[in-house]
């Protein structure tokens, strides 16, 4: 298959999973479901690491579709690896869509997965997709991701009028608390709006530093230090 293949036009972001592991009562890897705001649906994950990968893609403004395990590659029986089901499919607004495998770093150095990785990368290149392996993020970034992820639902999105006020409050950069104090309404009503905009990339901050009320927050058009680089799950 080549880059003009019909595979590029298949709506894989709405396809059903080709594989799903069995839930074990004592499973340590936190299987469950994640509400994907981008797709407005529940996605099943087999681990917390996979959930983190979903969340990174979900908050990326460039991502317009996301699904779990919609593709199964099948190679000849003579191949070292016969089948493989990558963990995620990511549809991007611009650029190349693609597949993501999610593995802990200790599982990517060799063995069967190394062969799977090489074959899958080659197959994606033939189709015209990207292929990446997500191995995790730092604990501070993850803590910020999970905190702001609680405000990902569109019910936390402010009205257009409030959105303009929030942008004005953080234009040029301001501490989180200072911007909130300049908006109408108490913190209980204002903070969810601001957190939603930080999650979605409308407001930027340093994801690698602990989120505090004195954290510097900027509008997305401001090039200040620590500005959000809009990382995606495939990074």
Image: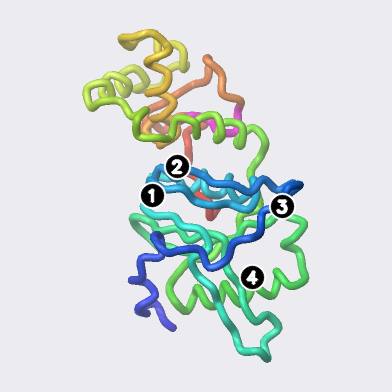
Which numbered disc flags the more N-terminal residue, 4 or 1? 1
Task: Give the label on residue 117, or none.
Answer: 4
The answer to whether residue 71 is above or below residue 43 is below
Report if residue 208 lies within the magenta region. Answer: yes
Q: Distance between the residues labelled 3 and 4?
A: 27 Å
Q: For numbered disc 1, what is the local secondary structure?
A: loop
| Residue 95 placement, left or right of 122 | left
Residue at the disc numbered 3? 24
Mark 2 and mark 1 residues within 8 Å of each other at the beta carbon: no
Query: Residue 180: x and y, percent?
Result: 40, 13
Give me the residue at 72% from left, 62% from top: 108
Q: How is the image coloured?
A: rainbow
Q: Distance between the residues labelled 3 and 1?
A: 28 Å
Query: Residue 42: x and y, percent?
Result: 46, 48
* Quadrant of the snapshot with the N terminus: bottom left
Q: What stretch is highlighted in magenta?
A: 204-209
Q: Disc 4 vs disc 1: which is toward the camera?
A: 1
Task: Give the label on residue 39, or none.
Answer: 1
Task: Give the label on residue 139, or none.
Answer: none
């Amino acid at each position: 298959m080549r880059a003009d293949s019909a595979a590029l036009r298949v709506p894989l972001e709405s396809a059903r999973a080709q594989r799903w592991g069995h839930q074990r009562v004592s499973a340590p890897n936190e299987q469950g479901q994640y509400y994907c705001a981008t797709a407005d649906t529940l996605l099943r994950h087999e681990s917390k690491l996979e959930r983190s990968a979903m969340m990174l893609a979900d908050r990326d403004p460039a991502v317009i579709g996301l699904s779990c395990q919609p593709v199964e590659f099948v190679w000849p029986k003579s191949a070292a690896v016969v089948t493989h089901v990558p963990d995620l499919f990511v549809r991007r607004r611009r650029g190349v869509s693609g597949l993501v495998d999610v593995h802990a770093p200790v599982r990517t150095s060799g063995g069967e997965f190394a062969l799977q990785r090489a074959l899958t990368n080659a197959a994606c290149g033939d189709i015209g997709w990207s292929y990446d392996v997500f191995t995790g993020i730092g604990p501070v970034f993850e803590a910020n991701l999970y905190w702001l992820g609680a405000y990902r639902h569109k019910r936390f999105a402010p009205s257009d009028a409030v959105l303009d006020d929030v942008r004005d409050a953080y234009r040029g950069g301001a501490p989180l608390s200072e911007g909130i104090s300049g908006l109408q309404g108490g913190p209980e009503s204002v903070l969810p709006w601001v957190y939603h905009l930080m999650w979605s990339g409308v407001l930027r901050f340093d994801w690698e530093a602990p989120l505090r009320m004195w954290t510097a927050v900027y509008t997305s058009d401001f090039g200040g230090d620590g500005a959000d680089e809009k990382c995606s799950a495939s990074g």
